Structure formats: structure tokens, C-alpha cells
Amino acid sequence: MQKITLITGGSRGIGRATAFYLAEKGHHIGIGYHTNQDKALEVIEIICQMGGKAIAIQVDVADEKQVIELFQRTDTELGYITGLVNNAGILKPQASIEQLTADRLNDIFATNVVGSFLCAREAVKKMSLRHGGQGGSIVNVSSAASRLGAPHEYIDYAASKGAIDTLTIGLSLEVAAQGIRVNAVRPRFIYTDMHTDGGEPNRVERVKNSLPMKRGGQPEEVAQAIAWLLSNEASYVTGNFIDLAGGK
């Protein structure tokens, strides 16, 4: 069966690297992007130049109607979805608890948590044996921040990723008998543009010497872990986590 994988947040960073890596493995790729159309189209163009097949769809994953349309278009334009990479997420500038506002918290949880739930829901509807599907695999992109807490910087982001960890465990148990595997990766200290969103573009350089491995990670290293969890080689793996944080 042709592997067809939908990647949210696929225009940059880990999502972009995952799109390229999976395309090299023969997956047809759908990427959801929020605002950066040029970057999204660049990903699609490169995949097509590689001889692959890919589409880009603009979506706000916190908007239920847009998520439903994302999956409908993927189904129509690519075919039966076999994999979902729940990667879309946002990070706000570094702040302590005293600086957090309800608006900031609502934004982060709407995208990082509600968006992941909605995308997982639609994927289950497509993949579930109960609904005539053929099974599939979901990989949630969490963060080692869910374990470490990100004090004085991103405790709101860390808490949102803690919710993703719980989603991974609960959903894996709920849909295992329906032919769907659910796992997660927990990267941190990865060289991506997200650190710019947090107000410190060179954050990985600052903290890398405090890591056991003494270096930051590359998006491609996370992509390889995601690809394995989606693959047949991981066919007996569900409800599990791969940490990619340099030993932290």
C-alpha cells in the first residue's frame, strides 16, 4: 500500500526535514502550513523535483472546520492517509509565570493541544478499521520540555507538550484494536527557527555545553525517529516515546 503521510507544520524545522526524509522513502506527502506559503511551496517543489508527490494546504489547526477540510483535501488529492505527523506548534517569547496572560495561554493551548486533538480525531476517522479504514500510524511531536518543565522560559509551552504526552498514551490505548499505532517523539535543543519565536535565536548554542552530548540536535535526526515510528519496522510499537534531547 502506498504510504501517504500528512505533516502539520510542514513548512519549516522538524516538519520540513520530515517531509523530505519521508519523500525519499517513497511517501506521498501532504503538508499543512499556517502562514508561510512561500516556504511550504518550496518544500513541495523540492519533493516534486526529487520525483515524489506532495501537496501543501494552508490550515489553522486550532480551527475545527479548517482541520476537517485539511483531511478531506488530503484524501481527495493524495488518497488514503496512512500516517499523521502532529507537528504544528507555537512558542511565545520567554517568560516567567508572573508574565503570562490568558491570551497567551489560550493561543498556545489552542494550537499545540486542541489542534493536535482535532488532527488526531480526523486521522482516526480515516484510518480506523471500524470505519472501513486500513489502519495507520500517528506520531505526535511533543518535547522534552514536558519532562523538564522549561522554568523561567516556556512553562506554558512545556505544559502544552505534557498534554501531548497524555494524548499519546490515552489515544494509543483507545485505538490499538482499530489498527492504529500512536507514538511520540520528544525533541529539545534542536537547531530550528522556533527559537527565534521564543526571542533567543541562538539558544541552542547557549545551552549545548550543559548537555551530556555537548551539542545541539539537527531536525534531520528527529525526522529519522519519526520515520521509524511510522514504518513497518515499528509495527509492534505503540504508546511509546523517543527522546531526542542530547541525553538531557
Image: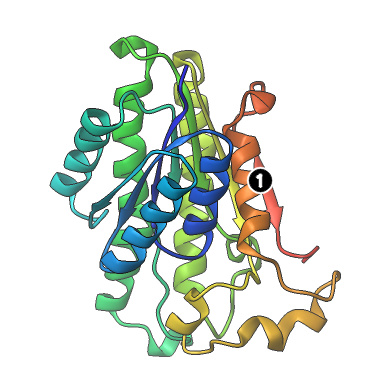
Q: How many marks do you count on the picture?
A: 1
Residue at screen point 81% across, 83% down: 209
How is this picture coloured? rainbow
Relative depth, front residue between 29 and 215? 29
Q: Quadrant of residue 84?
A: top left
In-image side of 130 versus 155 (left or right):
left
Q: Is 234 drawn above or below residue 189 in the view shown?
A: above
What amino acid is found at the position of numbered circle 1 in the picture? Ala
In-image side of 230 versus 54 (left or right):
right
Residue 155, position in %: x, y?
51, 74
Residue at screen point 46% across, 69% down: 157
Residue at screen point 48% across, 74% down: 194
Q: Is 182 drawn above or below residue 16 in the view shown?
A: above
Q: Quadrant of residue 213?
A: bottom right
In-image side of 222 versus 142 (left or right):
right
Position of the C terminus by quadrant: bottom right
Give the secondary structure at mark 1: helix
Relative depth, front residue between 35 and 52? 52
Q: Quadrant of residue 129?
A: top left
Residue 108, position in %: x, y?
35, 68
Furthest residue toward left: 65
In-image side of 26 versus 134 (left or right):
right
Residue at screen point 27% across, 65% down: 37
Q: Is 97 drawn above or below residue 11 in the view shown?
A: below
Residue 146, position in %: x, y?
58, 61
What residue would you read off at disc 1?
225
Near mark 1 (Cα within 10 A), the count class, few <14, some 14-19 or many ≥20, is some
Relative depth, front residue between 104 and 207? 207
